[in-house]
């Protein structure tokens, strides 16, 4: 598998992101390996908190939460999905599937880092990828926080009556737009979605891993994997994972924002199917867009710490 690696110089002097890069090698499923990057801050013997981002972000999105977790005694681990951030970037869109992302995350966290009793914080695509990885390793997870994401499924025993997914017309147009736009400067899209004006240095931080259009393939492919059609293989794969997660009884909290433009009610996809969600009413933060850690980072951090400390106290 051919891949690109963003030069280290691109990550120098990023705003509020002084964190060193750590790496593990994962299989590329074609006989080679890829380097997956992660931030690892706070006490090494502290309870691990794993943060998994979505698209088009990278571990930079957790920059305001990481030091708060570390200061409260947690080991803050924020990974970069393959194709994004400081991780290696395969060069063909066909190199990326959700199943491969799940396998890369599973290998990195559970085989290479050998994490146990880990708390998970999942945003956007990180929700689908993270929950799928957890489904087969429920004994390794201590709790889950899910934010502004959903877990769409399709029962394979039910015939497909209509190929287009209900309400997906806008997303289909978006997919076509990105398919034709090889130089999608997604950091500009992100900055337009946030409700607060994003400082130029933060926009630059989200853009840093992508010095030219060749590095954008993984981000562009995520848009093509959106579940706009009922024959998307992810939907059945998710369904099988959800059947396993129906045994997950550990604490599971939804923290969403009231102005999310993508999945404002995504928590309905896991509540009450996953037992761990039933004792935790969704928390809806006011004033946050889909990228709520840009709009309401302080409020988000307070809820995260309160949830984790409650588990510790319990």
Image (spheres, grey):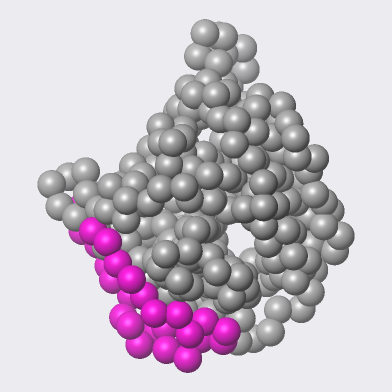
Tell me: residue 216, above or below residue 227.
Answer: below
Q: Residue at x 54, y 51 (%)?
A: 119
The picture places residue 282, in percent across and down from the top left corner, at 78, 43
Using the image as rendered, state which of residue 7 and residue 163 is in the foreground. Answer: 7
Q: Which of the 4 quarters of the picture holds residue 81? A: bottom left
Q: Looking at this view, is 264 or 169 the one in front? A: 264
Can residue 302 be seen at all in this image of the molecule?
yes
Seen from the viewer's position, the closer of residues 161 and 146 is 146
Q: Which residues are magenta?
A: 1-25
Residue at 79% across / 55% down in the picture?
257
Which residue is most to the left? Answer: 31
Residue 12 magenta-drawn? yes
- Residue under the image location 49 percent in, 24 percent down: 244
Q: Position of residue 111 (x, y in %)?
A: 28, 47
Overall secondary structure of the magenta section: loop
The residue at the point 57 percent across, 9 percent down is 158
């Amino acid at each position: 598998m051919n891949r690109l690696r963003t030069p280290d110089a691109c990550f120098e002097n990023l705003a509020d992101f002084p964190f060193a890069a750590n790496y593990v090698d994962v299989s590329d499923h074609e006989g080679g390996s890829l380097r997956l990057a992660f931030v690892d801050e706070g006490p090494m013997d502290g309870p691990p908190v794993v943060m998994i981002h979505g698209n088009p972000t990278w571990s930079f999105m957790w920059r305001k939460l990481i030091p708060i977790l570390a200061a409260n005694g947690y080991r803050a681990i924020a990974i970069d999905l393959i194709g994004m951030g400081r991780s290696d970037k395969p060069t063909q869109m066909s190199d990326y599937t959700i199943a491969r992302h799940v396998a890369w995350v599973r290998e990195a966290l559970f085989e290479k880092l050998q994490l146990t009793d880990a708390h998970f914080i999942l945003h956007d695509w990180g929700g689908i990828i993270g929950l799928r990885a957890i489904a087969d390793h429920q004994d390794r997870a201590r709790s889950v926080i899910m934010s502004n994401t959903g877990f769409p499924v399709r029962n394979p025993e039910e015939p497909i009556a209509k190929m287009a997914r209900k309400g997906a017309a806008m997303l289909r147009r978006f997919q076509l737009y990105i398919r034709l736009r090889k130089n999608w400067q997604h950091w500009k899209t992100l900055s337009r979605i946030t409700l607060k004006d994003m400082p130029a240095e933060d926009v630059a931080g989200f853009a840093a891993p992508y010095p030219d259009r060749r590095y954008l393939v993984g981000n562009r492919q995520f848009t093509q994997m959106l579940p706009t059609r009922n024959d998307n293989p992810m939907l059945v794969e998710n369904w099988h994972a959800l059947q396993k997660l129906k045994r997950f009884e550990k604490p599971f909290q939804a923290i969403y924002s009231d102005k999310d433009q993508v999945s404002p009610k995504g928590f309905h996809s896991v509540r009450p199917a996953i037992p761990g969600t039933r004792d935790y009413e969704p928390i809806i933060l006011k004033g946050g867009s889909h990228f709520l850690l840009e709009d309401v980072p302080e409020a988000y951090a307070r809820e995260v710490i309160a949830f984790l400390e409650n588990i510790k106290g319990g």
